[in-house]
Image (cartoon, coloured by chain):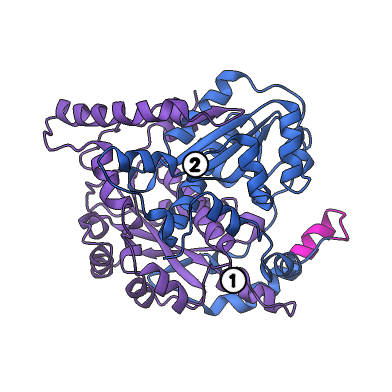
Chain colours: A purple, B blue
């Protein structure tokens, strides 16, 4: 339809990065796209930390649960929920920030970091770079905070690997559109059947690409979502001054 | 640099919509972009509800705190955090979903809804439509849930107005890049001075466009962030089966 739609609908995560350096102007353009992304209530409560130094990427790869592509990608962007900005903005008119104690504050952080990540990912893809978002830095949130020198009222939400791609990955099938798009009212009816069919479809998809160890959707979702996979987040938030309780 | 970068860096919220109908194929393309957006752990825990019916948009405008553009925009998309899908996926392998009780679950919801919103907004902008994200539907979350028929383990995170634009809005200045981009380590130093300068810059910006009532950044941020502006969210989450406590 147009280049923007093509970029968005062909998006996928790529992990096989070459060592090719990302020119500064390309990186600047990607970050500019993040800087211009929408932000809730004009809060602008996002910061991005560019990590290029190889030994530092290796350390973050370890914190992210040993994800080698974090070390391999020539640039790793850390997207930070940054309420420090809000704290200072409140203080400039004699107010005390309170939203870090409300669940709304956690939602704002997730939403705005997600929006910023998406803008930078789309920009990077359009410039010929491969990308993979990394939620794994939430596995060891305090270590990441200390490593990046993050002040109170901030939290490293996720990362984004950037690099030129050696072996492009496949676009995996998704749950059908009938489970994503609803008109006027939510329609629960297609979902139950869709999950069962999608479980089979994913196994068949991997098999058709020579991978007999390919798991169904439920087999990957179950272990991640049936427990608290990242128990260190809650105490780290508390230490950063954010309870998100009310 | 390219059409994608131009679309991303010229983004702004527009609220002056015409009545022009959005053709079905345009809307389908926008939603397809959301469906293909990245999702944490392949969770695919987002759904989108398309609201076109004028009286229903009027009702949602009211729930969003009387925002007339929600009623005026010919299409309003509600972006739903949809853990119902995860619940069924877990059950298909005999597991019980637990992540709705962890703060990680709230972050995943915010992040994935934000990513989906950004993809659809970028797609819409590239197709000549104006957009404005609406967090205000979290003002009255239970009413929105009932109105849209949302099942347990779901939550209406935000909306997105779509429409053709009558009077394009201005791009407001942002906090400077030095407060957004950090290299290798977070740098707190520029922030304090930047907030004061930005407060003055915004007032001057509005004045230069004939608006003498234009507020500084701190004057808009303070009232929103120094209290729990959306206290109904927490009890609504509890009712939907999501505590996000651990």
Q: In which image quadrant can residue A61 be found?
A: bottom left
Q: Nearer the viewer, mark 1 or mark 2?
A: 2
Q: Which SS class for mark 2?
A: helix
Q: Is residue B37 visible?
A: yes
Label 2: few (<14), some or many (≥20) within 10 Å? many
Residue ID at (46%, 76%): A238
List x then y, in percent, for residue B230.
Answer: 66, 59
The residue at which mark 2 appears reads as B116
Q: Which SS class for mark 1?
A: helix
Q: Is residue B15 visible?
A: no
Residue ID at (63%, 61%): A43
Q: Does A193 appear above or below A99?
A: above
Question: Which chain does tag 1 point to?
Answer: A
Q: Which residues are magenta?
A: B202-213
List x then y, in percent, for residue A107.
Answer: 54, 57
The residue at which mark 1 appears reads as A85
């Amino acid at each position: 339809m147009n280049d923007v739609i093509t970029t968005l609908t062909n998006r996928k995560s790529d992990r096989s990065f070459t060592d090719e350096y990302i020119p500064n102007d390309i990186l600047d353009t990607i970050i500019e796209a993040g800087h211009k992304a929408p932000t809730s209530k004009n809060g602008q409560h996002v910061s991005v930390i560019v990590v290029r130094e190889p030994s530092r990427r290796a350390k973050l790869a370890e914190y992210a649960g040993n994800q080698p592509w974090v070390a391999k990608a020539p640039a790793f962007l850390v997207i930070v929920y940054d309420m420090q900005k809000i704290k200072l903005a409140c203080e400039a008119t004699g107010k005390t920030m309170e939203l870090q104690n409300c669940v709304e504050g956690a939602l704002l952080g997730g939403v705005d970091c997600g929006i910023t990540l998406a803008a930078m990912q789309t920009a990077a893809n359009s410039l010929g770079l491969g990308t993979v978002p990394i939620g794994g830095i939430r596995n060891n949130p305090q270590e990441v905070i200390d490593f990046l020198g993050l002040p109170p009222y901030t939290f490293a939400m996720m990362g984004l690997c950037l690099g030129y791609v050696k072996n492009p990955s496949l676009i995996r099938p998704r749950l059908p559109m009938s489970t994503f798009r609803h008109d006027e009212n939510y329609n629960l009816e297609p979902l139950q059947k869709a999950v069962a069919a999608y479980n089979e479809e994913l196994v068949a998809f991997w098999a058709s690409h020579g991978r007999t160890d390919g798991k169904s959707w439920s087999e990957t979702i179950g272990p991640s979502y049936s427990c608290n996979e990242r128990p260190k987040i809650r105490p780290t938030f508390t230490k950063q001054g954010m309870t998100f309780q009310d």
